[in-house]
Amino acid sequence: MLTARPLVLSAVTFLLILMRVGTVAAEGEREKGTINVVVPRATIYPGDRIVDGLIDVRPVKANSSYASAVFTARAEVDGQIARRTLLPGRAIPRDAVRSAPIVQQGEPVSVVFLSGSIQIQLNGTALQSGAVGETISVRNSDTGRIVRGRIKSDKSLEVTSQ
């Protein structure tokens, strides 16, 4: 009888271990459908700059298409500007923010016109604010003519011929 009892305890222990492994596996499956999303801690209004202190990262149950529509890391949204009101605890959609402008309306800018091997540089005044990669209108300082150009990282505008 003494030898049978340790076997019974071993079988019970084995069953408990199997049940726990099954529970852990089920929890792991639930975690597979979970992604981390960036959410505001407080209401962020249109035009406000989003800084690290205003955001948190929280896990939510979602699929991969949802993950591509929202921010999943703080660094992706830090420094961006809100386009619309962002509510606390709700995931921040990618289309709800824009890059911070590097060119401000009224600021003098350098405009570079490119056409094949020809390059012309002139000075102008930005008629709109904009971020890198955006196209804005600029008034030529010499002629008063308005041209549209794409903002480059050095704060100059590039105009290309069609």
Image (cartoon, rainbow, N blue to C red):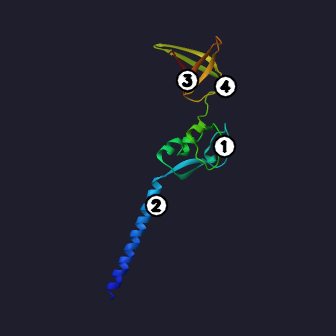
Query: What's the amino acid at mark 3?
Result: Arg
Within 10 Å of disc 3 (Cα), the crowding (few <14, some 14-19, many 20+) is many
Answer with the quarter of the image where residue 52 lies.
Answer: top right
Helix, strand or loop at mark 4: loop
Seen as rendered, the residue at the extreme top is 143
Helix, strand or loop at mark 2: helix
Q: Earlier in the sequence, mark 4 or mark 1?
A: 1
Within 10 Å of disc 4 (Cα), the crowding (few <14, some 14-19, many 20+) is some
Q: Nearer the viewer, mark 4 or mark 2?
A: 2
Q: Which mark is residue 27?
A: 2
Q: Which residue is mark 4?
A: 105
Q: Residue at image x 46%, y 60%? A: 27
Q: Which residue is mark 3?
A: 150
Residue 82 drawn at (x, y percent)? 63, 38
Q: Is residue 32 above or below residue 99?
A: below
Q: Earlier in the sequence, mark 2 or mark 1?
A: 2
Q: Viewer-proximal residue, 145 or 142? A: 145
Q: Nearer the viewer, mark 3 or mark 1?
A: 1
Q: CA distance from mark 3 to mark 1?
A: 29 Å
Query: What's the amino acid at mark 1?
Result: Ile
Q: Earlier in the sequence, mark 3 or mark 2?
A: 2
Residue 131 drawn at (x, y percent)? 59, 30
Q: Residue at image x 60%, y 23%? A: 136
Residue 140 drawn at (x, y percent)? 63, 15
